[in-house]
Amino acid sequence: MSWGAQYFYYHCPKCGKKFEYALDLMTEFGDEFGNCPDCNVPGVYEKDGARTPDDNEYYEVE
């Protein structure tokens, strides 16, 4: 059993920004889910799951 939101963690291959998307926003963002919020290019998947200890390094896309 998991508690709390689930996140997908990415980094941008163009600018290097680290960012995260909450899984429940997948339907809101559609095909742009996982894109860099600055460059709008698909992010490179790193990991997914509940919040991680290094979560503060990632920008939360809302």
Image (cartoon, grey):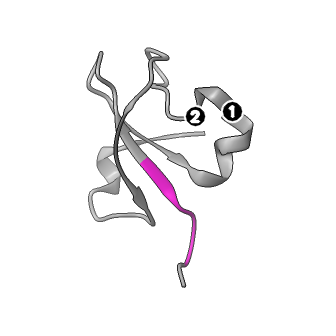
Residue 30 disc label: 1
Q: Which residue is mark 2?
A: 33
Crowdedness near tag 1: few (<14), some (14–19) or many (≥20) residues, C-alpha within 10 Å: few
Q: Is residue 40 magenta?
A: no
The relative height of residue 14 versus residue 29 in the rendered view (above or below) is above
Q: Is the Cβ of the residue at disc 2 closer than 8 Å to that at disc 1? A: yes
Q: Quadrant of residue 33?
A: top right
**Circle 1: element type:** helix
Quadrant in the picture for the C terminus: top right
Badge 1 amino acid: Gly
Residue 24 left/right relative to 61? right
Residue pictured at 53% horizontal, 79% vertical:
2
What's drawn in magenta, residue-wise? 3-8
Q: What is the residue that sits farthest to the right in this orientation?
A: 28
Badge 2 amino acid: Phe
Residue pictured at 27% horizontal, 57% vertical:
54
Q: Nearer the viewer, residue 46 or 37?
A: 46
Pinpoint residue 9: horizontal percent, then vertical percent.
39, 46
Pinpoint residue 16: horizontal percent, then vertical percent.
26, 25
